[in-house]
Image (spheres, rainbow, N blue to C red):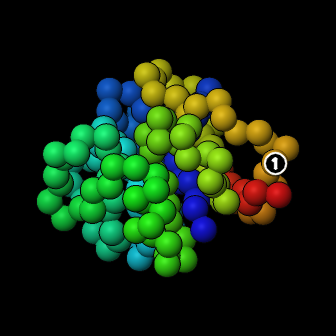
Amino acid sequence: MISFIWAMDENGVMGKDNTLPWRIPEDLKFFKETTMGHPIVMGRKTYESIGKPLPGRENIIITRDKNYKAAGCTVVHSFEELFERAKNEEELFITGGAEIFEQMMPYADKLYVTAIQHSFPGDTFFPDVIEWEDWQLISEKQGDKNERNPYEYYFRIYKRR
């Protein structure tokens, strides 16, 4: 199963200057708990914005650069190579960035979205590729707004119809 996982604001902003424009510890916890033990896939730029492999899961970087290396990560150069590498995985998480989300959307089976009810300045947006009528909301949980998590937000999970 191929799943997407990301957070975005009410305008589709996912990032600014290669970082998250918000600080919501509960979202980071959700990401960690959801992806732990499963491979995560990201583009080179997303990986470089993180700067190191995320522990407890295989980090797969997809890049066109045949010479690219990243310590502690698996590097693939095509979707075919990715699919072959991950064919026995129960769930594979696509974590971004925007170009990878756009290209992988036809293969997605499930979406894990943290929807933040606030508008942030940003330079990276989730691509306009989701045909929402193709997706069924199967879970929605409102996050706790508090001093540490200062915005209203929802954890939503969709499956392809």
The image shows residue 77 at horizontal and vertical percentages of 33, 49
**Front residue of this view, candidates 48 and 32:** 48
Residue carrying label 1: 134
Please name the amino acid that badge 1 sits on. Asp
* Residue depicted at 54% across the width and 71% down the height: 91
Q: Is residue 31 visible?
A: no
Q: Quadrant of the C terminus?
A: bottom right
The image shows residue 130 at horizontal and vertical percentages of 70, 39
Quarter where residue 111 is shown: bottom right
Q: Is residue 19 left or right of residue 107?
A: left
* Residue depicted at 29% across the width and 47% down the height: 47
**Front residue of this view, candidates 113 and 72:** 72
The image shows residue 27 at horizontal and vertical percentages of 49, 54
Q: Is residue 105 left or right of residue 71?
A: right
**Front residue of this view, candidates 155 and 55:** 55
Tell me if residue 12 comes above or below residue 83 in the rendering. above
Q: Is residue 38 left or right of residue 139?
A: left
Tell me if residue 8 comes above or below residue 58 in the rendering. above
Q: Is residue 93 visible?
A: yes
SS category of the residue bearing label 1 = helix
Q: How would you rate the neighbour count of disc 1 (Cα within 10 Å): few for under 14, some for 14-19, many for 20 or more? A: few
